[in-house]
């Protein structure tokens, strides 16, 4: 199991970015795919036609999202924590993803950089 941590800068305020990460209709705007997502603790979510699926653990509106991502039969939960720090109409995002199975680590890192936060950076580019 491996961990991944990275910071991203996105050209939109934290409350708007939070909505882009937690509202199914808004997720569809920047991904181009339908999504199942509710900002309610304990609900399950699915993005990119079940390429990413898991359970929402906690929310702090405009500030923090904590999720468990499912990876088959792994015993140790894979936890994603996204912390939003607003900086003058922009947001610094702190991503921590723990307990990523070794065999999918490179794909997960690539997905974060290109498809997930890469897509958000492009969507909100100036």
Image (cartoon, rainbow, N blue to C red):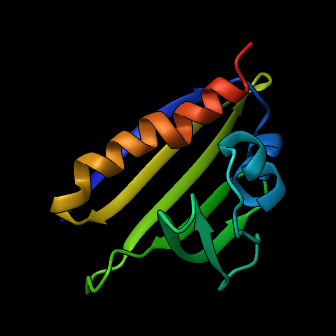
Camera sees residue 33:
yes
Comparing 115 with 94, the one in front is 115
Residue 81 located left or right of residue 26: left
Instruction: Choose top left, top right, bottom left or bottom right for residue 126.
Output: top right
Q: Residue at x 24, y 46 (%)?
A: 106
Camera sees residue 23:
no
Q: Residue at x 49, y 64 (%)?
A: 52
121 in relation to 36, above or below: above
Q: Residue at x 54, y 70 (%)?
A: 67
Residue 17 located left or right of residue 54: right
Residue 106 located left or right of residue 38: left
Q: Position of residue 12 (x, y in %)?
A: 77, 29
Residue 89 located left or right of residue 69: right
Q: Position of residue 14 (x, y in %)?
A: 76, 40
Quadrant of the snapshot with the N terminus: bottom left
Comparing 83 with 29, the one in front is 29
Comparing 105 with 14, the one in front is 105
Q: Position of residue 6 (x, y in %)?
A: 40, 38
Comparing 38 with 57, the one in front is 38
State the count of labels: 0
Q: Residue at x 76, y 72 (%)?
A: 38
């Amino acid at each position: 199991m491996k961990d991944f941590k990275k910071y991203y800068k996105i050209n939109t305020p934290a409350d708007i970015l939070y909505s882009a990460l937690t509202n199914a209709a808004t997720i569809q705007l920047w991904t181009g795919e339908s999504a199942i997502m509710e900002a309610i603790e304990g609900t399950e979510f699915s993005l990119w036609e079940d390429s990413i699926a898991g359970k929402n653990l906690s929310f702090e509106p405009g500030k923090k999202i904590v999720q468990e991502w499912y990876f088959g039969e792994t015993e140790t939960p894979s936890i994603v924590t996204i912390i939003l720090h607003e900086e003058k109409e922009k947001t610094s995002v702190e991503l921590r993803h723990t307990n990523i199975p070794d065999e999918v680590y490179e794909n997960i890192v690539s997905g974060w950089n290109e498809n997930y936060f890469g897509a958000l950076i492009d969507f909100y580019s100036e």
